Amino acid sequence: MIVLWPNKGNHPVVVLNDKDKINSPITLSKRLLIVENQENFIQKQCTLHFLQQQFPDFNAKNLDIAHGSGNAISNRLNKAFFKQYQQIDCLLDLDIGGLEIFKNLINLTQHKNLNFLLPPCADGLLVNSKISLQESHLLVLRQYHQQYALLQPVIQLMTKHKKMLEQELYL
């Protein structure tokens, strides 16, 4: 089950998925934005405004927004859902959980246009973050850095500051 703000909708809808079939009350758009945290998902306009400020080429046209609901978005039953999209962008926490979600999406979808959105302001926000990386986190980060090239910029930034970041700070 995925809670989704449809491209031209003013209220979220629920999309039900199983291994082979999608049951959606709306026609899906061409692009998908996955937002991990509920607060950022609910404040859709603020989140879109933030992305437009951080990424000058970010465009909200033909964009559905899915609530990541933590790692629930990477459930294998959602595989057919992801195939409907030409592009999937992910706005995730800069922490082990966010990296794990993205890793799981890479493995599940094998999507050719899957992106981890790393806002330019993250460097400054990490400086002031109160969430420190632990030694056990560094082991996971090294493993992900070696196995997932798309995560390397995020991991380098996190290890540079030895900190993690919750995406609610983007609001």
Image: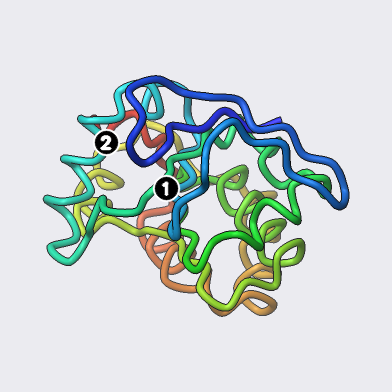
Q: Within 10 angstroms of label 1, few (less than 14), some, or many (20 or more) residues?
A: many
- Judged from the image, the secondary structure of the residue bearing numbered disc 1 is strand
Nearer the observer, 81 or 94: 81
Q: Position of residue 169 (x, y in %)?
A: 28, 31
- The residue drawn where x is 60% and y is 56% is 102
Q: Quadrant location of residue 22?
A: top right
What residue is disc 1 on? Answer: 91
Q: Residue 162 shows which numbered tag?
A: none
Q: Quadrant of the N terminus?
A: top right
Location of residue 130 (image quadrant): top left
Three-letter code, disc 1: Leu
Residue underneath mark 2 = 47
Residue type, label 2: Thr
Q: Is residue 103 above or below residue 152?
A: above
Callout 2: 10 Å neighbours few (<14), some, many (20+)? many
Which secondary structure lies at badge 2?
helix
Q: Nearer the viewer, residue 161 or 49?
A: 49
Q: Residue at x 12, y 63 (%)?
A: 56
Residue 79 located left or right of residue 167: right
Q: Position of residue 100 (x, y in %)?
A: 66, 51
